[in-house]
Structure formats: C-alpha cells, structure tokens
Image: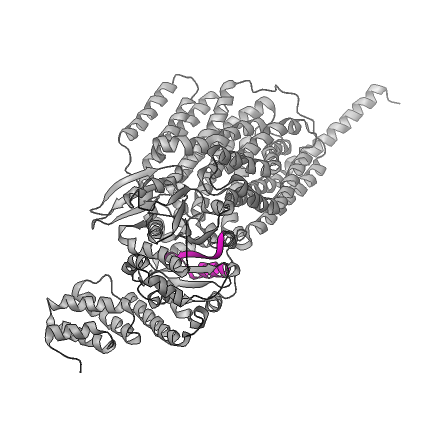
Amino acid sequence: MQSEPDITMIASAERFARTAASTRGQAARPWALVPIVTASGFAGLGYEIVWTRQLSLALGTEMMAVLGVIAGFFGGLALGAFALDRLIRRATSPWRVYAVLEAVIAVWGLISVWLLPAAGRVLPPLLGTEPSPILLWAGSLALPTLALLPATMAMGGTLAALERMTRHARGEARVTAGVYGANTAGALAGTLASTFLLIPALGFSGTLLCLAGINAFCALAALALGSAAGKVDAEQPRPQRIRDLRLTITLFATGLLGITFEVVVVRLAAQVMEDTVYTFAGLLAAYLLGTAAGSLLWQRTGRDANDANLRGLLAATAFACITTAAAAPCAGRLVEVASAADIFGELAVAIALFLVPATAMGALFGLLAQRVSDQRGSVGTAVGINSLGACIAPLVAAQFLIPALGAWTALLAVAVGYLLLLPPGRSVLLWSAALATFALVLWLDPAAPLTRVPAGGALLAVREGPMATASVVDDAAGTRYLEVNGHFRMGGTSSTRSDYRQAMLPLLLHEAPHLALFLGIGTGATMVGGTQMPGVSVHGVELSREVVDLLPWFVDPQPASAPRLTVADARRYVAADTSQHDVIIADLFHPALDGSGALYTVEHFAAVKRRLASGGIFCQWLPLYQLDMPSLRAIIRGFLDVYPNGAAWLNHYSVRTPMLALIGTRDGGHLDVDALETRLHDPMTAKVVRPLGFEAPIDLLGQYVGGPRALSAFAGEGPRNTDDYPFVTFDARRNVRALRAAPWSLLLAVMKDIQPDPSELLAGPGRDALSARLDAYWHARNRFLEAGASLPGDPRGAALIDAASPGLIDALRLSPEFDPAYGPLMGMARSLLGSDRAAAARLLRKINEAAPTRPEARELLLREFGLRNE
C-alpha cells in the first residue's frame, strides 16, 4: 500500500502527463488559428467599409461627418481594448471569451442592416439644414459612436484574445507582431473583397450578412479549438499601468501619426488619381499591405523590443515619410504611366506611395505592442492607447495640418513627429540632424502644386482645404475654368451659355416658378442663370467651402438678385429641409467620383420629391460624356420609380459635352404649350431667354428626348441605384473608361434607342399639327448630332465648312425650323463672301433649297449676286 505522498506524486505525474499531451496537441495545430486570425481581420475591415459608407448617407460627406465616423470607430476600439483587457488576461478560456466577442459583432452586424438606415432617416431632421458646427460635430460623433459601440468594443478586444490564444497554442511568449500582422493581412483581404466583390454583387445588406457569417465561423472555430485545449491558467496579476511613460506616449503618438500620414497621402492622391471608391480601396489596401508586411517581418526576425531597435524603426519611419513627400509630386506621372492598367495601375501607384512607410509603421507597432504584452501579459492596452491616437488623427490632419500647412507640407510635419519620439541615445542627434536636414531642404524648395496647368496657361488661385483642392486656371486661349482636386473640371467662362440653359430649361417648363433650389453650384453660372429669371428667388447648396471661396473669379459677387448660399452636403440638406420649392435643379455630378453616386439613388430622388411644392419640378442633369450605359439605365430606372411621369431632355446640341436632363413633376400632367408661349413672349422673360436660343415653344420642345414609356423601354429590366445597392458608385471602373471614349458615343446610342412620342408630351387642341412639326424637328436634331460627331478632329475655317455643311443641309431639309443648323449655315455663307464668293453662292442655294420658307438665304443671294429663287 502506497503512502499519501506517493499517491500525491502519482496524481501530479498524471496531471503533468495530461498537460504535456495537451500542450503537444496544441503545439501541433497552431496553424488552426491562422484562418481565425485572418478571418477576424477580414470581417473587421469589411464592416468598417460598409458602416462608413452607410453612415455617410446619414451624416453627409462634409469633413466633420467623415471625421466623426472614423473617430467613433476608433473610439469604440479603444474603449473595448481597455475595458476587456483584464477579462481576457484573467480568463481560463480565452477561446470562449473570443467566441462571445465574435458573436456580439455578428449580432450587431445583423442589427446594423436595419439600424443604420433607420438612423439615417432620423438624424438629418434633428440636425436641421444649417446646424451649428458644435451641433454637427456632436451628431457626427454621437451617431457612429453609439450606433456601432457594441460591435466596435467587441472588436477592440479580439486582438488581445487572439494573441493569448496563439501564445498558448504555440507555447511562445512573443507572438504579438505575428498575430497583428496576420490579422492585418486579413483586413487587407477584407478591404479588397468587400469593395471589388461583395458590395458590387450583394449590396450593403448582403455584405453585412456575409460578414456576420464570417464572425459566426470564427466563434464556432474558436469554441471547437477551446474545447480541445481545455482550460488554461489565468495570467498572473500584472501592474495595472504601463511602467514606462515613454512607451505610453510613443504608442499614442504613433497611432496619431500613422493615421495622419494615411489621411494626408489619401488627400494628395485624390489630386492625381481618379478618386473613385476603388481608388480609396486601393490606397487603404496598400497601407494595410505595408502594415501587415512590417509586423510579420518583425515577428520573423525575432528581434528584441529594446531601445536600440525602437530608435532604428522610428528613424526608418521618419525617413520613409520624408521620402514619400519627395516622391509625391511624381505621383501624377506615375498615374499616367499606369493608367493603361486601369484599376491595377492605381493600385500599383498606391503601393509605391504607401508600402515602405507602412511597413516601417507595422514593424514599429509590433515592437511597441510586444513591450506592452511583456509587461502586462496582454496586448489590449497597447491597442487601446494606439487607437486613442488614431481616433483624433483625422481631426488633426483635416482641421489643423492641411489647412495650416497644406497636404504636402503636412507629410514633413508627420516625419518630424516621429523624430521627436526617438529615445535618448548617442546616435539620436546624428539621426535627427540628418533627417531634419532632409526635411528642411524639401520645405525650402517645396513641390509645385499638383494642379495641371496647360501650356501657355496660368494658375490664378488655389484653395486647399480638408475636403478638396480647388483651383482657378487660365488656358492659353484665355478661357478660365475651375478644377477640383487637380483634374475634375467644374465649368468655366467658355460654358456660361450652356450653364444658363441648364437653369432655364426646368424654369421654363414650370408654369410660374418662384422658389428654386440648386444642388451643387460649381462656378455658380447655373445658379446665377436662375437669378436672371423674373420673379425667381434662388438658393444654392454646395458641399465644398473651397469652391465657394473661388466663386468671385467667375460670377459677380453681388448680383442684382443675390442668391442665398449654403455650404452643406446636398443629401443631408434635402433630408433635413422643410421648405417647399417650385423647381429643384441638381447639377452635373461626375458619377465615378466617390460620393457622387449617392446623389443618383432612389432614396435621394424620393427625398427631393418631398421638397417640391404643388406643381413642382425636379431636374437632374446627367453628364453623358462621363457615364456608361449600365449606369445610365440604372439611374433612369430609379428615377422612374419615384417620378413615373419622368422625361428626358437635352441641354444643347453639342457632341463634345452632351448632357441629359431627367425631369419629373410632383403631380404629373402634360405641358401647357399655350402657357409656355405666353411666357416666352413676356418682355421681361424674353429679354433673358432669347439670347439663349429660346424664342418659340419649338426651340424648347425640340430638346425633348422621350417620356416615361420611351424611357422605360430604353432602361429595361435591371438594378436600381439605391442606398443599399449603390450600383453607380461601384460601376466606377466602367464610368472612368467612358471618359476615354468619344464624348458623343453614349449620346448617339441614347438618341438611336429612344424614340420620342409627341403624345407623351402634348395634350389639348392643335396637338396633331404641332406633333408633326416636332417629329420633323427631332429627326433634324438627330441628324445634326450625327453630323457633329462625324467631324474629323477640330476643323477650322474652310475645312469646317466642307466637313459640316452637308450634315447641316440634311438636318435643314428634315426641318426648316431647326435653327441650330440654319444659323451656322448662314454664318458659313457670310464668311465665304470675303474669300470664295462662288462657294458662298453654292452654299446659299443649298440653304434656300433646303429651307425655302426662310427668307434670309434668298435675300442674301439677291443682294450679293442678283440671283432670284426660281
């Protein structure tokens, strides 16, 4: 019989054997955690992308709203990291804790399918149309923080739980950088998959369901591994505060500087890249790629987290930031070289800008997080402190650094910030002096503005703000135009007549407009055109303060009837507005530009309809030279859902910048042609509209393209552009390619496929006679457009006459009333009188034959050549 001590020893040996076997089993399958770690990062970034875009629909795209979303997200991460750190360290089953966190994220992901759209409907009316900065800040911070808090807090604890699970599975103490790197690699995959695959295919709700499924997989897999591993010893109590104050400051500052660097580089890249949803995804992916690579490299090398290595990584990060500042002016040329590769070319440029500095930042966080883990037994505090710095970084970048220094100089400030964090040492002065000298040289010889100025032109003014860089440029011919972010032209002095017509078309279609709201103002010409209409009070809404500041370069700062102007996001303004408007006119929004697609959704069209007074008209202008056919059809389908009596109209007959207006009314009904004619003959109205080519009703009605039946047949079946399924936003690649096609290609396709029906436009007595005239006019218009598209290059003088006159004569034969052909032909004939009288006589004969009812050609033949019409 064995003694008591012997039995105790045997029991201890048996427990040791079971523990060793368990440890060997765990050590044999540490790879099983890799899918969980990466999938967790995949879902986290997927949620961030979807939630940020959903919240922007509620808060708008003003910078305060964007910053509020980012701050709320990182603030929740920090709070969760702090609050859950002790629980994770003391848990005997970190797998179970982690599974609960993933389950919370999954449940809240499902709730957000309903919650965020509902919040988006409630918040704008609470904020009002022109909230004070404090109120807008409060709302922009409160909504994302509160709406996402359960999920973001849970996310804040997942990295700490994953790190502890990995340490136990691998039997190693130092795994922090590897876990962070693998998690970030998953985030990289989540960014690309969500943006390029999931959202375009499934929309926001479908993507959230997929991401919730990934969270459920992570939770179940963790429970399965945890049940096999059994319980583990809780971490021994550690000091509740990090013992090294310098470490705390460095963690906070590197979070602040790293996200500031990201914001500033994205801001610079917007001036040379296409600035689509895919541009941002590519930039974010490049940043995550570098961060993941740096963390994994640091884990692989297995170096100590001592001051010497910290000093080297801080110096390397500062040097990489300065190098990026030096290379940034070349980004435009890199984009031009890579443009043939479409979105992959932009991704390559993003990697060139981000890879090296982000790699240094990833290794740096790996080192710092490992120090915290060594002190506290958990990485949670490191995540929390770093996330706090990241939380305020967008505010610092957008509200202080960029306005005060400019985006390019802000990169140098970030580099100096890293230098100030260098630990004391003999080599610090040498590192600091060398890098500071490099930064000083760049600052004394700053990079030229990224705005492209044409040869012989001049850059007249620049306003650089947190949202955009707006520039006023003169070309060699003296034409002044407005550019936003270096390459989006927003109108200019050469398009004033066209801009005025954009206002006049919907204002003339309304029987008696008094209040007009303009969404998007650009150079202000369309809005100012609206002020010319007698009896009309105008209110304009513009997103960018920088654009508003440059208006005096294009319009009289104090016109006779000065319009009211509000700087606000158009979607949020319309949702919050309680006024009723007779006419609402939405300007041309480049559909590929990130954020513009939200202004073409069914929900926004419906919000506009609620703001129309009785008999009110909504006009949405579409830039056909920036659209592809699938996006155009999706927009028309959505428009007809809200305005079943909608119609399409042209602005002018230019094939270089063709525009299509979708016009819908609140109450339906047909156009009163007699009332239109009365208005056109009113002396005050005629004084304004006749110089724009509107003398008789047919001049206006000739711009009609098609009514609801014709548009419905043209649009066919397919997706609508909605808030939940933003088809136009994610069709950006095709819309960018449309910019490289002939600008008239979509216009000609539209005119070929849509056959206007006069019965959808006209009603009442005399309709048949006017219908026949209109039908001829529309055929002449289409022939005129075909002739313009077939002109070779940009012919001038005699070459223009030879190339253009046959098509114009054909159009005139179809409808002698078609002034856009008759006027240019008479101008050509008069110009030939001084150089080639025989050619002038031949052309005048053709004009007279095509339009015998019009006397000008016959009278000129008689006066100049003594020839009578036979």
| 156 to 6, vertically: above or below | below
Q: Where, by quadrant of the figure, is residue 756 drawn?
A: bottom left
Residue sitting farthest toward the bottom: 870
Membership of 622 in magenta stretch: yes
| 122 to 860, vertically: above or below | above
Image: magenta residue range? 611-639
Q: Is residue 44 left or right of residue 16?
A: left
Return the x and y of residue 126 as percentages of the image width and height.
Answer: 54, 40
Return the x and y of residue 441 as percentages of the image width and height.
Answer: 28, 28
* Residue 127 visible in the picture: yes
Return the x and y of residue 366 as percentages of the image width and height.
Answer: 51, 30
Q: Name the residue rendered at 30%, 26% in the picture.
A: 440
Return the x and y of residue 79 as percentages of the image width and height.
Answer: 58, 30
Name the image quarter holding the N terminus.
Answer: top right
Q: Is residue 231 left or right of residue 608?
A: right
| 869 to 235, vertically: above or below | below
Membership of 296 in magenta stretch: no
